[in-house]
Amino acid sequence: MRGGARSAQRSLAQIVLGFEVIVVFLGMLVIYGLKALPPATAFAAGGAVIVVMILTLALLRFRWAYAIGWLVQLAVIAGGFLVPAMFIVGIIFTAIWTWCMITGARLDRTPQQAADGAEGEPAEQTGNGPETRDDDTNGDHR
């Protein structure tokens, strides 16, 4: 991996989009099987969404790619107009995507805040290591 640690938000987004590619592929087959669209249209539209999702997976190193991720979520929800079950699938994936964006951003901020707080401040004693004291405070006075 180049460029240091990977963003938690990016990792979570890639996981969600990766699984969503599979679900969109299966949804495309359902749309074709139920004849909700002509075969060429079903495969072209489903394939286009899948290609956009795969490209977005590769482009998540850029902040603007997350906006494409949000648009993909809307596209999956819109699939519900063809197959009503896609409303449920789209809402579930949008909820997961939203959670990943919020939690990933929070996780990415936490190490930075810890690093900012550690600069110029003395380290806190946690009580987890041996302490050096002149008096014996452990109760063993032999």
Image (tube, rainbow, N blue to C red):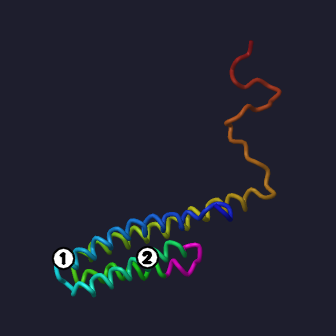
Residue 91 appears anywhere in the view: no
11 horizontally vs 99: left or right:
right
Query: Horizontal and vertical percent for residue 41?
Result: 27, 87
Residue drawn 43% across the image and 71% down it: 98
In this picture, is 47 found above or below 7? below
Which element type, helix, strand or loop, lies under badge 1?
Answer: helix
Residue 64 appears anywhere in the view: yes
Mark 1 and mark 2 in contact? Answer it, CB < 8 Å: no
142 horizontally vs 21: left or right:
right
Front position in the image: 14 or 43: 43
- Residue neighbourhood size for the residue with mark 1, other residues' Cα within 10 Å, grouped as few (<14), some (14–19), many (≥20): few
Q: Quadrant of residue 16?
A: bottom left
Query: In the rendered structure, which segment of residues is drawn in magenta?
Result: 60-67
Which badge, 1 or 2, is on the more N-terminal residue?
A: 1
- Residue neighbourhood size for the residue with mark 2, other residues' Cα within 10 Å, grouped as few (<14), some (14–19), many (≥20): many
Q: Could you tell me the amino acid type at mark 2?
A: Met
Query: Horizontal and vertical percent for residue 122?
Result: 79, 50
Magenta span includes 109? no
Which element type, helix, strand or loop, lies under badge 2?
Answer: helix
Q: Which residue is mark 2?
A: 53
In this picture, is 117 found above or below 22? above
Q: Where residue 115 is drawn, which disc sits there?
A: none
27 horizontally vs 127: left or right:
left
Q: Which residue is mark 1?
A: 33
Front position in the image: 125 or 69: 69
Q: How many marks?
A: 2
Query: Horizontal and vertical percent for residue 105?
Result: 55, 68
How far apart are labels 1 and 2 at the CA level? 22 Å
In front: mark 1 or mark 2?
1
Q: Could you tell me the amino acid type at mark 1?
A: Gly
Front position in the image: 27 or 13: 27
Q: Quadrant of residue 115?
A: bottom right
